[in-house]
Image: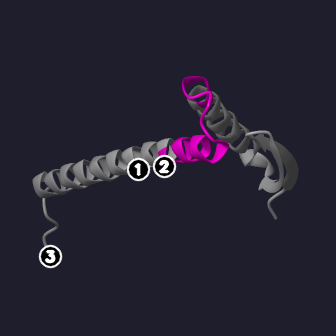
């Protein structure tokens, strides 16, 4: 059974307690740090902006980044599949 760890992260000054797989703790903390950094960046650029506006900007940025990575991954998987097909075509066929 996978070991679970209770951690507390802070995002935009709000604390959240989460139960996470122990092996993934660092990923959760890095994700929170990354989001807080982006929130701080947008807050510096727009000091008079409403908090919900800043959070929406940060959420959109993170979502956009994830989408770009997903698209790149899908493109890479397509290329790997094409290469695999080409290699298979070059291999001798089993003769019965």
The Cα–Cα distance between marks 1 and 3, rounded to whole angstroms, is 47 Å
Is the C terminus in the top left, top right, bottom left or bottom right quadrant?
bottom left
The label shown at residue 96 is 3
58 to the left or right of 77? right
Secondary structure of residue under mark 1: helix
Instruction: Give the answer, above or below, for where 37 lies relative to 32.
Output: above
The label shown at residue 67 is 1
Q: Earlier in the sequence, mark 2 or mark 3?
A: 2
The residue that mark 2 highlights is 63
In the rendered image, residue 50, in percent from the top left (x then y), is placed at 63, 41
- Judge by depth and name the residue closer to the eye, 8 or 21: 8
Magenta segment: does it hold 52? yes
- Judge by depth and name the residue closer to the eye, 79 or 42: 42
Q: Which segment did they paint magenta?
A: 43-60
70 to the left or right of 11? left
Q: Earlier in the sequence, mark 1 or mark 3?
A: 1
Q: Quadrant of residue 3?
A: bottom right
Mark 2, Cα crowd under 10 Å, few <14 / some 14-19 / many 20+, is few
Q: Quadrant of residue 25?
A: top right
């Amino acid at each position: 059974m996978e070991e679970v760890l209770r951690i507390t992260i802070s995002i935009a000054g709000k604390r959240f307690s989460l139960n996470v797989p122990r092996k993934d703790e660092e990923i959760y903390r890095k994700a929170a740090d990354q989001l807080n950094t982006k929130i701080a960046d947008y807050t510096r650029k727009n000091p008079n902006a409403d908090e919900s506006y800043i959070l929406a900007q940060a959420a959109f940025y993170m979502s956009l980044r994830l989408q770009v990575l997903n698209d790149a991954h899908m493109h890479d998987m397509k290329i790997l599949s094409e290469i695999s097909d080409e290699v298979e075509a070059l291999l001798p066929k089993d003769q019965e």
